[in-house]
């Protein structure tokens, strides 16, 4: 039933080129794809006829008649982008060029049964569609990010620790009763955030970079040769369980000294609570009391911003450990850039600067020559924008 | 002057498909490339006319006339594969299908001026050619691996620590007086060894794996989506300087506790000498005396093979540290396999089994589900076979 768009090899190349570089003339496109103008004209003809491409006015002339420009047909249909967090969902609808039309955020737990979850999610999407007079069967594709390892080809989660009921659940078919023609793509949340940065954020124009999400855990999205790199089991980028101290505390994975248990949000909060209780940090002691015994990594960031020396030490310790792991990854992968996102990236610039220092100190000189280490640009929007970009990257499949 | 072979996009795809999968009929090739039989027939016609492809007898029939099979024209020209070590060179000549015709090994130092080095190298190649009546202008391509970081597009080494005189030296043009039509491709030695394993060794059929070379240093070749991954500065895979102990000994790179300084060949030899001198290992004390004060990692391997407990501990310590680094890489990269090669891989199976144990213990369960950790299959031949495969992967460039 689903409306997978089958195209020839060169048709797919033409679509991807326009998605990546924007509107182009037939001559530009032929040059870009390194193919003869005659063959390209026939391919474009087919894509215009099927309604995937449209002509959108005239470009600059190289002398003669001004060439007509080709673009993706924004009205061909709609795309939904979904970003599932452990305790929240973000949904968005975009036109067929990937431009955001509207979005919606809601708290929701992934601990309920996935069938019910997808039902609720579909209802929310339909409500969003209603606002813009979009019908369910106009939805061409759904892109969805989830906080766990995904087998991309089937769209199933594999033993996800945060959402155990979803193990092997057929997400793709669960959407079918609601959106009969939509093609569904599911990927790990950090992967789609990396894709988002590449499409609309700090990673524009880059082909090889890492997106590091620091929150309750630590994860990494890998863009390799312009595409998401998933590894052989779909769990590439699971950097939270890289060891930074063989004698460190035991992680929930069972091993000692994982960077996640020692440097992510909960570790920062724990250290903050300790220093609040011991009275070493008066700021944190006051905040702990105000919050009735609860203290988060953000509170530690607030303390550091207010000049609290102890809080600043906690943050620097986290940054130092994370930077050590990034140095290893930089030596191995030699990326163009590392973008840092996630909740903990909001605890202040001293965290980022310590990460940067520790990475540069430990990685080889050549691998850091042009390396950028920066905060991500898209923040919370990275997920939905990446989910939409993911569909456009995968929607056009070559005929079998 | 150089005979770079310019082809259309689909011609290049046809050549690569035959290089990868062997002889194919036009029908097979059209199916493989997902293109119409009619278009393919015209492409194949051009490739037959230019002499790159030949028809090689008949394949199995699907009912009617038996189809003619297409293969690369082995006599189109010759390819040289060169593997430069710090103290040795291996050269080989192959036909245009990449099949080895002859090879030669010689001790040589990379510390002399590269111009002289390339002159000597070219003379050796011509001598090898003479034996088989091959003329210099029949050499279509040279693939060369060097022990240092390479900017692949220009074929220049970038600040190579082992061969400082080669920094930025134009290797490609230095071959031109000797082999006027040969296209030259230069890459890091570990990258070409990984490529060799993929083409003819343990990595056949795999798309994402690591090749770890353990010798004087520790390096890593990365195959990603079937191709060599080089990173943004050409230095991806420089894993020898990943830190395993922040309080460890200072490495020649200036940082403390790099895995290379603590676990590669010299570290094993140093520990062996210490235990020989202290008398803790009688086997090593004897060997040190026999060798007149010199002891290598191989000697420590011999001691372990003879049942020496102390030598075995030294080897296990090295394996444990290397396995710790590999666990981090497995979590990050989730490869299908890791193949271990280089001189130190010959010190016995207990080294490999400790590496394997340490990797599996520390990496996440999902990432190790199907992970293979094995010795490389090609041993010392990996370099020249990889260099030859490298040329075939890059020789056919798409017309501009």
Image (cartoon, coloured by chain):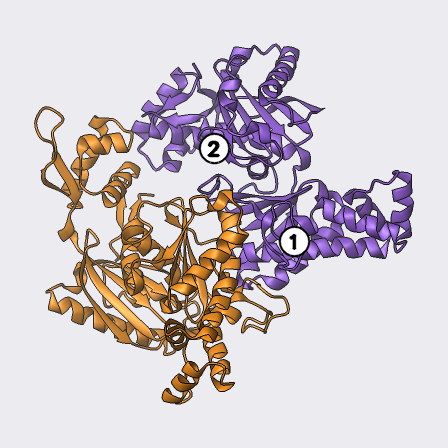
Chain colours: A orange, B purple
The residue located at (75%, 49%) in the rendering is: B268
Give the x, y percent position of residue A225: 40, 44
Give the x, y percent position of residue A286: 40, 86
Give the x, y percent position of residue A84: 33, 68
Characterize the local packing of mark 2: few (<14), some (14-19) or many (20 or more) Cα atoms within 10 angstroms. Answer: some
Which image quarter holds the N terminus of chain A? Answer: bottom left
Q: Nearer the viewer, residue B347 or A380?
A: A380
Q: Is residue A277 visible?
A: yes
Q: CA distance from mark 1 to mark 2?
A: 28 Å
Query: Badge 2 sits on which subunit?
Result: B
Corner quadrant of residue B93: top right
Characterize the local packing of mark 1: few (<14), some (14-19) or many (20 or more) Cα atoms within 10 angstroms. Answer: many
**Looking at the image, is A78 positioned above or below residue B181?**
below
Q: Is residue A234 left or right of residue A143?
A: right
Q: Secondary structure at mark 1?
A: helix
Q: Nearer the viewer, residue A301 or B69?
A: A301
**Mark number, residue A245:** none
Corner quadrant of residue A189: bottom left
**Looking at the image, is B134 positioned above or below residue B143?**
above
Query: Badge 1 sits on which subunit?
Result: B
**Looking at the image, is A23 positioned above or below residue A321?**
above
Q: Is residue A326 visible?
A: no
The residue located at (73%, 56%) in the rendering is: B317
Circle 1 sits on which residue?
B322
Corner quadrant of residue A242: bottom right
Question: In terms of sequence position, does the residue under pointer 1 or pointer 2 come before the other?
Answer: 2
**Looking at the image, is B132 positioned above or below residue B186?**
above
Give the x, y percent position of residue B170: 50, 23
Circle 2 sits on which residue?
B152
Q: Secondary structure at mark 2?
A: loop
The residue located at (82%, 53%) in the rendering is: B311
Are labels 1 and 2 assigned to the same chain?
Answer: yes
């Amino acid at each position: 039933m689903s409306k997978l768009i089958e195209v020839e090899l060169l048709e797919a190349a033409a679509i991807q080129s326009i998605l990546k570089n924007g509107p182009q003339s037939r001559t530009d496109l032929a040059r870009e794809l390194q193919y003869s103008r005659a063959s390209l004209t026939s391919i474009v003809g087919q894509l215009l006829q099927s309604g995937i491409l449209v002509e959108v006015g005239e470009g600059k002339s190289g002398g003669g008649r001004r060439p007509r420009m080709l673009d993706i047909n924004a009205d061909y249909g709609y795309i939904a982008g979904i970003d599932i967090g452990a305790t929240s969902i973000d949904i968005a609808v975009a036109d067929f060029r990937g431009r955001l039309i509207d979005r919606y955020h809601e708290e929701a737990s992934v601990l309920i049964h996935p069938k019910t979850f997808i039902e609720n999610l579909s209802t929310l999407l339909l409500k969003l569609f209603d606002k813009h007079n979009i019908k369910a069967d106009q939805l061409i594709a759904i892109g969805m990010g989830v906080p766990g390892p995904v087998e991309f080809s089937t769209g199933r989660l594999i033993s996800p620790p945060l959402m155990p009921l979803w193990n092997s659940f057929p997400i793709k078919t669960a959407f079918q009763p609601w959106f009969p023609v939509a093609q569904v793509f599911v990927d790990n949340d950090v992967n789609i955030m990396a894709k988002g940065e590449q499409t609309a954020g700090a990673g524009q124009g880059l082909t090889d970079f890492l997106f590091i999400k620091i929150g309750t855990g630590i994860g990494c999205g890998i863009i390799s040769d312009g595409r998401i790199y998933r590894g052989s089991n779909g769990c590439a980028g699971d950097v939270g369980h890289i060891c930074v101290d063989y004698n460190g505390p035991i992680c929930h994975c069972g091993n000692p000294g994982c960077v996640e248990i020692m440097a992510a949000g909960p570790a920062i909060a724990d250290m903050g609570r300790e220093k609040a209780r011991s009275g070493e940090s008066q700021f944190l002691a006051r905040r702990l009391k105000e919050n009735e015994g609860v203290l988060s990594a953000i509170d530690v960031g607030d303390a550091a911003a207010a000049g609290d020396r102890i809080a600043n030490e906690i943050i620097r310790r986290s940054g130092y450990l994370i930077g050590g792991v990034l140095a290893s990854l930089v030596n191995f992968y030699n990326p163009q850039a590392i973008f840092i996102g996630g909740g903990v990236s909001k605890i202040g610039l001293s965290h980022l600067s310590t990460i940067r220092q520790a990475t540069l100190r430990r990685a080889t000189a050549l691998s850091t020559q042009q390396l950028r280490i920066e905060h991500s640009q898209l923040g919370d929007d990275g997920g939905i924008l990446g989910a939409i970009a993911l569909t456009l990257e995968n929607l056009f499949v070559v005929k079998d």
